Image (tube, rainbow, N blue to C red):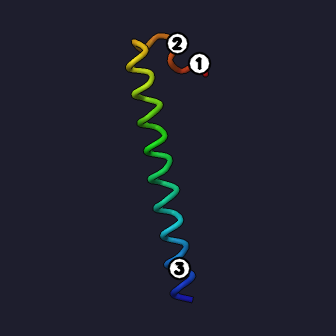
Amino acid sequence: MFQQQFKYNLMKKIIITNSIFHFFSQYRKILLRGGDGGLVE
């Protein structure tokens, strides 16, 4: 039971970290492009 909970928390952390990382790389790309049309992929 505890093992399952630990695995779940770990997965959650990985997913959150990945989405934050993805967001920041997208954000940097937008900034590097000068901000116009950056959101259109």
Q: Position of residue 11 (x, y in %)?
A: 53, 66
Q: Are marks 2 and 1 in contact (CB under 8 Å)?
A: yes
Give the residue number, with chain letter if any, for mark 3: 5
Q: Position of residue 31 (x, y in %)?
A: 38, 20
For residue 31, the mark is: none
Give the residue number, with chain letter if any, for mark 1: 40
Residue 9 in the image, given as x and y percentages of width and height: 49, 70
- Residue at point 44% right, 53% down? 17
Quadrant where the N terminus sits is: bottom right
Q: Residue at x 48, y 69 (%)?
A: 10
Q: Secondary structure at mark 3?
A: helix
- Residue depicted at 44% across the width and 21% down the height: 30
The disc, 3 or 2, on the residue closer to the chain's N-terminal end is 3
Q: What's the amino acid at mark 2?
A: Gly
Does dot 1 land on a helix, a strand or a loop?
loop
Q: Earlier in the sequence, mark 3 or mark 1?
A: 3
Three-letter amino acid code at the position of disc 1: Val
How far apart, in angstroms, are the residues tagged by discs 2 and 1?
Answer: 6 Å
Alpha carbons under labels 3 and 2: distance apart = 42 Å
Kindly give the residue lying farthest to the bottom in the view shown: 1
- Residue of label 2: 37
